[in-house]
Image (spheres, grey):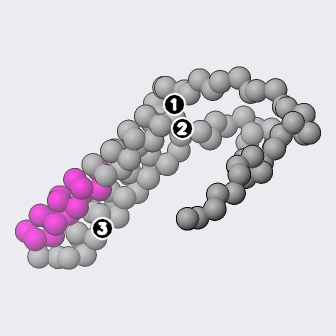
Amino acid sequence: MLSMFKSIPTHMDYKGQKLAEQIFQGIILVSAVIGFIYGLIIEQFGWTVYIMLAGFTVSCLLTLPPWPMYRQNPLTWQPALPEAPVESREKPQENLKKKKHK
């Protein structure tokens, strides 16, 4: 059962994050405008809130899961550098000479 959950992809690339943010903001903005106009016409503030909540729910369903459209541009990582021996590694502060202030 645990292996089934580990097989679900959970990452999103940078362009996918930008797209998700734009979709989220667009849906929220459109639902706010529609909710405000509809609530103004029927003179019921409650409907404005309901429409906003519906827009929020739709935007969350479209942007929170890492859908494949958000994973179109994966990053190519450089290969890892081999580890240097512990003795040859020095702290940068130890290499600097202390300067006297004049």
Asked if residue 68 can be seen in this view, the reply is: no
Label 2 to label 1, Cα distance in Å? 5 Å
Q: Nearer the viewer, residue 89 or 1?
A: 89
**Which of the image's four quarters has the C terminus?**
bottom right
- Overall secondary structure of the magenta stretch? helix
Q: Earlier in the sequence, mark 1 or mark 3?
A: 3
32 vs 76: above or below: below
Residue 40 is inside the magenta segment: yes
Name the residue at 27% across, 63% down. 51
Label 1 to label 3, Cα distance in Å? 32 Å
**Dot 2 amino acid type:** Met
Q: Residue 71's mark?
A: 1
Label 3 to label 2, Cα distance in Å? 30 Å
- The x, y position of residue 36, in whole percent, is 16, 66
**Dot 3 amino acid type:** Tyr
| Residue 90 position by quadrant | top right
What SS does tag 2 mark? loop
Q: Which residue is mark 2?
A: 12
- Asked if labels 3 and 1 touch by Cβ distance under 8 angstroms, the answer is no
User: What segment is highlighted magenta in the picture?
Assistant: 27-41
30 vs 67: above or below: below
Name the residue at 90% across, 39% down. 86
**Dot 1 amino acid type:** Arg
Name the residue at 49% across, 26% down. 73
- The x, y position of residue 4, in whole percent, is 76, 38
What SS does tag 1 mark? loop
**Which of the image's four quarters has the N terminus?**
top right
Q: Which residue is mark 3?
A: 50
Q: Mark 3 or 2, which is nearer the eye? A: 2
Q: Nearer the viewer, residue 2 or 77?
A: 77
